[in-house]
Image (tube, rainbow, N blue to C red):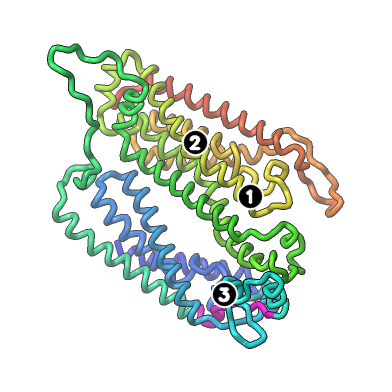
Amino acid sequence: MIAFAVVAGLFAGVVADHLEARLFPFADPGASFQDFGMRGAIVPGRLILAVGCGLLVGALVGRTLPAMILALVLGAMMVGAVDGVHQAIQVREAVPVDQNSIDERFAGRIVDFRYELASGDLVTHEELEALHPDPAELERQLQASRQLVFVTPGERYAQVSLREAAVTGSLGLLLVVATIPVVGRRDPGPGWVRIGLGRGVRTPRRRPGLPATGKPGPAAASRLALWPHRAELAGGDIVGLGVSLACVLVVGTLSSVAPPPQCLADLSNIPMTQDCATTDQFLLFASEWASVLFVAMAVLPWLVGTLIGVVIVGREIEHGTATLAWSLAPDRRRWLITRVAVAAALVVLLLAIPSILATEMQRIAQPWVPPESTFENYGLRGPLIVVRGVAAFGIALLVGALVGRILPGVLLAALGCVMLAILVSSLAPFGVAVDMARPVDPRAFSTPREHLGEVELREGVLLAASALAFLGASVAAVERRRPY
C-alpha cells in the first residue's frame, strides 16, 4: 500500500509539474511557488499521510463511510497543521522585498508583512500602533514608512517542498505503525472501538403496576428514526459544523481587520492613512481563506446531502435490518417519510448556518456592493446552498434505496449530483434575458444584477422540484423492492 502511494504520488506530482509548465511558460516549475502543495514532491508525501489516516481511522471505527469521512477530516487537519508550522519556519528564513517590486511573474511565496521605519526598524502594524498611540503621529509614521513583504525566494522551492514532503510522509508512516497495535487488540466485528461512543439510548424505567406509555412523542420518534444511522450521520454533522465553525472564524477575522470601503475602491493607489493601514492584511486574509471557504461552499451542500441521504434506506438494506423494520411498520411509505422528514430537517439545519455566514462573508469582503444585488460568488451563499443540499439528499435517498449498499451508493449519488449540477448550470439563467452589449465590453453577454432574485428563485424551484421527484421515486422503490 505504501509503495503504491509513493509510485502514484510521484506520477501525479510529475504530471502536475508538466501541466504547470504548460500553463505558465514564463515560470520554471522547479523554481516557483506557483500552486505550491498541488504538484511536485509534496503530492506523494501527502498521499502517504492520507493512507496512514485511512488505515488508523478504519481500524478504530470499523465502518466504511464514517471511517472515510473522519480520515478525510483528520488528513486535512494534519496537512493544515504541517503547512502552518512550516510557514512559521519560512517566516524566519524569508527575505524582505519591496511590495512595489512584486508583479504577476513573481515566483516566491509571501509569508509576512512589515513596515520599515525611517530608523530602519521592521515592525508590524500592531507594534507600530503600540509605539505611536496618537492617531496623528501614527498616520505620519505610516506615510513615512515603506511596506515590505517577506518572501521565500523561488530558488528555494525544491528545498522547501522536499522538507514538507518528508514531514508529511513521516507522519503517514507513524500512523501506519500506530495501526498495528490497534488491529492486534480490537474485536474483529464491525463498529467503533469501545471508548464510550457506542452507548445505547437510555429509556425511562416504568414503575411497577403502571401501564407502558403509548406512542412515542416527536422527539423520541426522531431519535429512534436516526439512532441506527448515528455513525454515518455524524459524518455529515462533522462536515457541516466544521465548515460553519470555519466561517465564523473567517468572518470574525475579516470584521476585525476590515478597512473602510474607500480604502478598497482603488487598490492601485491605497491611501497610507491610519484607517487604511490594515488593507493589505485584509486582502491577504480574504484571498487565502475567504476564497477557500467559497470553494468549500460549492461542495458542501452536495456532500452533506449525499452523506445523510444515502444511509436512510441503504444502511437498513446493507445490514439486513430492513426485513424486521418493514415487517413491523404499518406500511413502508409511512416508515420512509418519517425518517426522511427528520433527516431532511437535519440537512436544512446544517446548511442554513454556513449559508448565512457565507452571505455575511461576501458582504464584508466586498462592502461596496450588497450581496443581494450582485452575482459575485453566485450559488456559493444564500438559500441556494440549502436547496442544493436538499436536492443532493433526494438523489442519495433514491440511490441508496435502489443500490442497497452505502459505499457504492455514495459514489453513484456523487455522480448524480455532478450531473444535476451540470444540468442546472447549463440552464442558467433560466429564461432571464441577458444584455448583449455592455459599456465596458461590447462583446460581453451578462445577466443584469437586477435579475439576481429572479434567477435564484427559478433555480431554487427547479432544484426543489427535483428533490420532490427523487423523493417520490424513492417511495416507489421502497414499496416495490425486496428488503435485501
Mark 2 packing: few (<14 Cα in 10 Å), some, or many (20+)?
A: many
Q: Amino acid at mark 3?
A: Glu
Q: Whole-percent x and y of residue 422?
A: 59, 41
Q: Badge 1 is on which residue? A: 362
Residue sitting nearer the eye, 243 or 321: 243
Q: Which residues are magenta?
A: 145-157
Q: Position of residue 146 (x, y in %)?
A: 68, 80
Quadrant where the image shows the N terminus? bottom left
Q: Could you say where residue 9 lies in the image, as x and y percent from the top left?
A: 41, 65
200 vs 35, nearest the viewer:
200
In the rendered image, residue 370 lying in the magenta stretch gets the answer no
Which of the two marks, 3 or 1, is nearer to us in this view? 3
Q: Which type of secondary structure does the marked residue at label 1 adopt?
A: helix
Residue at which label 3 appears: 127
Query: Regarding mark 3 in the picture, which secondary structure is present there?
Result: helix
Work out how far the residue at label 3 is from the one at label 1, CA to CA, in angstroms: 30 Å
Q: Quadrant of the C terminus?
A: top left
Mark 3 neighbour class, 10 Å CA radius: few under 14, some 14 to 19, many 20 or more: few
Pick whichever of labels 3 and 1 is earlier in the sequence.
Answer: 3
Q: Amino acid at mark 1?
A: Gln
